Amino acid sequence: MSLLAENYPLPAEGTPQNISILGATGSIGLNTLDLISHHKSRFSVDALTANENAKLLAEQAKRFNAKFAVVADDSAYKELRDALSGTGIETAAGVSGLVEAAERPVDCVIASIVGTAGLEPTLSAVKKGQRIGLANKECLVCAGELFMNEVEKCDATLLPVDSEHSAIFQVFDFDSPERVDKIILTASGGPFRETSLQDIQNATPEQALRHPNWRMGKKITIDSATMMNKGLELIEAFHLFPVSVDQLDVIVHPNSVIHSLVQYCDGSVLAHLGTPDMCIPIAYALSWPDRIECPVKPLNLAEIGTLNFEDVCSERFPALALCRQALQADGSGPTILNAANEIAVSAFLSKQIGFTDITRIVSSVLEVADQENMMKKASDLHEVAVIDAYGRRQAKTAVEISR
Ligand code: NAD
Ligand code: MG
């Protein structure tokens, strides 16, 4: 992904940039709206979407004078329509509504729906050549190559919101990628970095949801606890930046102050540092190539004192190696892995399976898929959908067996 800043003139003074947020009621969505509320003259809101929380969505739409509000879940539509009647704010529901929201021409679409559900609307924004602040990592994991081909073909602008990828984007030499030796993704290690293997086995959703450094949605918080999140991010980085799988490293950095690093052929290592707050990468995606102020406590290195690093413990976190293998196999492994993981995480959150069952189930689904010849590369999005559905079915069966 190479973007030339000079092709993106800064907005004229006094003309607010129109922003749409897919997934406005989630953690990234709320952070984005908070940031917009600090820059009212710079940004205005066009479309907002949610899954089912019509009440919060309607409040947000009114507060930010949105033009269009969409709930994905049809059963929440009446509540949304009633709450917004007489306001002049248009409403819609379902996937078609999400797609309509994504296609409305704006200055930036923040793609922050969680999971594969984000693929179709985000891709619709891509196809309209929009500028996209991409938070949703699952769409790159499940359809990375096809997604990036569309970005290229439709001349869309993709700006990473995931903090590691925003960091890499800021220190990667896109003019001379051959000078890059490797990308080093940092991982906090999550809540179980020092937990014994025995205790990890018995970890509850409440414990797994207690992330030491970041406040995020439930799915990504569980992914951080298994370290599947870092594996998904490795796949995400592979699609976003011109490097091979072997050039992608991960290091545990419990402080979450360095958000990722790029190592160059001369031994120089460029890092991006900042207070661990998603407001910073969101602000960068919204304002790039400019920078805007963020309502975030400035980084105080003297207060932090020491930055710590350690290798990833592969025994504790087998999910990372699983993601790497799936990517290296160069087929549909990532699509199946992602689908199985979504099912397993949801089963863990509803206490149907244990914590370590998540990675075990994902691994077993990949094995079955290999035996059943389902790992071949998808040639179009329809095939991706078929493979994704297959992964979900297999994972549901594995959950049933584990209960
Ligand atoms: P979240 O669960 O807090 O919010 C998800 C949003 O998507 C909500 O608005 C929800 O209503 C909507 N949604 C859920 N299911 C939907 C469906 N089926 N159809 C349409 N909309 C649906 O999640 P989050 O933590 O904000 O994460 C969003 C995405 O950003 C994820 O892909 C995550 O991996 C990525 N991300 C999040 C963070 C973070 O700090 N939260 C950091 C990096 C990347
Ligand atoms: Mg991240």
Image (cartoon, rainbow, N blue to C red):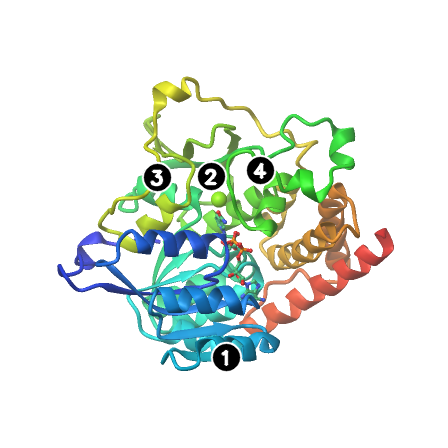
Q: CA distance from mark 3 to mark 4?
A: 19 Å
Residue at point 59% right, 73% down? Answer: 73
Q: Nearer the viewer, mark 4 or mark 1?
A: 1
Q: Is residue 353 left or right of residue 53?
A: right
Tag of residue 82: 1
Of residues 171 and 120, the one drawn nearer to the viewer in this rendering: 120
> Could you tell me which quadrant the N terminus lies in?
bottom left
Disc 3 target residue: 296
Q: Which residue is mark 2?
A: 247
Which is more N-terminal, label 1 or label 3? Answer: 1
Q: Which mark is residue 164?
A: none
Q: Position of residue 27 (x, y in %)?
A: 49, 52
Tag 1's secondary structure?
helix
User: What residue sits 64% from the left and 29% below the top?
Assistant: 313
Which residue is denoted by mark 4 in the rendering?
A: 211
Whole-percent x, y for residue 385 in the image: 61, 70
Q: Amino acid at mark 4?
A: His
Q: State the image quarter where residue 227 is shown.
A: top right
Left or right of 387: which side holds 121? left
Q: Residue at x 50, y 40 (%)?
A: 214
Task: Determine which quarter of the picture holds residue 65.
Answer: bottom left
Rendered image quadrant of residue 324: top right
